[in-house]
Amino acid sequence: MRRTQHSVEVAKRFKELVENAGDSLNEAHYDELALLIEAAVDTALVEQLESIGSKLDNLAHEMRHDAEFFE
């Protein structure tokens, strides 16, 4: 999955920033960060899909309504 790989890459970049600052974290924290990033991306995608679904539902309703009055 591209989202998973992207999340891992973002976590790796964050790890680089932390280490360049002279700090460190347990590897498990970076794994958890990747999961949190992936969950955030998934949530944003679901919200977008719900919005698109609502627009399609409204369009279908308008089309049915217009079809009733088509001459």
Image: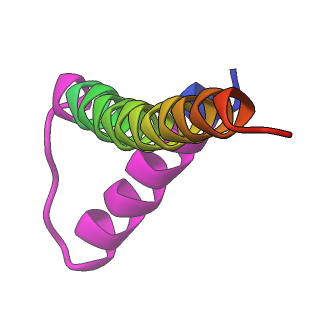
Measuring 21% from the left and 22% from the top, which residue is drawn there? Answer: 28
- Please, is residue 64 above or below residue 22 in the view? above
Q: Please identify the residue farthest to the front as the structure is shown.
A: 71
Q: Position of residue 4 (x, y in %)?
A: 55, 27
What stretch of residues is rendered in magenta? 6-29
Where residue 23 sits, quadrant-wise, is bottom left
Relative to 4, 18 lies left or right: left
Instruction: Choose between 66 and 9: the one closer to the eye.
Output: 66
Instruction: Give the x, y percent position of residue 52.
Output: 53, 41
Give the mark count.
0
- Residue 13 is situated, as x and y percent measured from the top left of the image, at 46, 61
The answer to whether residue 62 is magenta is no
22 vs 39, nearest the viewer? 39
The chief SS type of the magenta part is helix
Q: Vertically, is 16 above or below 66?
A: below
Q: Is residue 71 left or right of residue 38?
A: right
Q: Is residue 47 above or below residue 14?
A: above
| Residue in view at x 68 percent, y 37 percent | 69
Front residue of this view, candidates 38 and 64: 64
